Amino acid sequence: MKNLLKKSLFTLAFICLGYGVFAQDQVTGGTSQTLTAVHTFGSTFAWTVVGDNTGTTVTISETTSAVTFTWPTVADTYTITVITTDINGCKSEPFTKKVQVLGEPTVEFADAGDVTGVCSSATTIADNGSTPIVVHYTGAQPWTLTYSILDNNDVVVDGFNNVEVANLNGDYTIDVAHTFVNNEATVQNWKVVINSAKSADDVVVNATDNDKNIVVYPMPVITNLTLN
């Protein structure tokens, strides 16, 4: 009777240690992760990971409930399947999960070239406007962006040193307020700099275009007012 009871109580569920892969269903190719099958009465486990479109197969020789492996670098949707066998030789139903494997993540400014036509900020004006600067990202999401704003002398502007924005999905727009002050006779070049970016599975992203110049015009000045 006990053996019959065991045969009817097979249950399997996946958890992923480290990155919560099954909460996001996206990983970066070439990264290593640990999969754990939460089970009842399981003894040995047979794992397969196969690309749905490419047929790329990950060989997993371990027969334990927790296995560590490296995802292929070939982008595809992969189906993970695990079957457990108990001490009586009884097998469970297959438990499957699909995970999207993405290529190396990238981050860059969406538009090439400088931001031009920005006027120097007038301190008596409450709102001098702003410029939206779009950062384009590809890779496992949600992702994290860290950026800074530098003045004409490459000094970090107060309040804009390593600004971190987390839990992003898709492109992100930095709305840069026009607080630039240019009291010189020629234009100045301020910058928005991508310090770093990180994918959902903690892969550090190298920016291919990591700074954006903002060309700031000199502030017009009235030096006197005469009456004739």
Image (cartoon, rainbow, N blue to C red):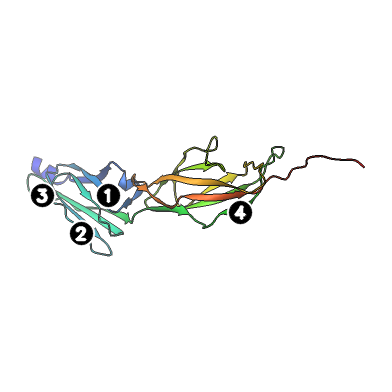
Q: Which of marks 2 and 1 is in front?
A: 1
Mark 3 and mark 4: Cα distance apart in space: 71 Å
Callout 4: helix, strand or loop? strand
Residue ID at (52%, 52%)? 134
Which mark is first along the chain, 4 or 1?
1
| Amino acid marked by disc 3 | Cys
**Disc number placed over residue 57 in the picture, else none:** 2
Q: Mark 1 against mark 4, which lies toward the viewer?
A: 4
Q: Which amino acid does label 1 sit on?
A: Thr
**Disc number lying in front (3 or 4):** 4
Residue 13 seen: no
Q: Is residue 26 left or right of residue 81?
A: right
Task: Say which of marks 1 and 3 sits in front.
Answer: 1
Q: Which of 105 and 54 is in front in this view?
A: 105
Q: Which of marks 2 and 4 is in front?
A: 4
Which numbered marker is on residue 116?
A: 4
Q: Name the residue under label 3.
A: 90
In the figure, residue 146 lies in which quadrant? Answer: top left
Q: Which mark is residue 31?
A: 1
Whichever of callouts 2 and 1 sits on the residue coming sooner in the sequence is 1
Q: Whole-percent x and y of residue 106?
A: 40, 53
Q: Which of 77 and 94 is in front in this view?
A: 77
Of mark 2 and mark 4, the one earlier in the sequence is 2
Mark earlier in primary sequence (1, 3): 1
- The amino acid type found where label 2 is placed reads Thr
Q: Distance between the residues labelled 3 and 2?
A: 26 Å
**Alpha carbon separation for disc pair 1 and 3:** 34 Å
Marks 1 & 3, CB-CB < 8 Å contact: no
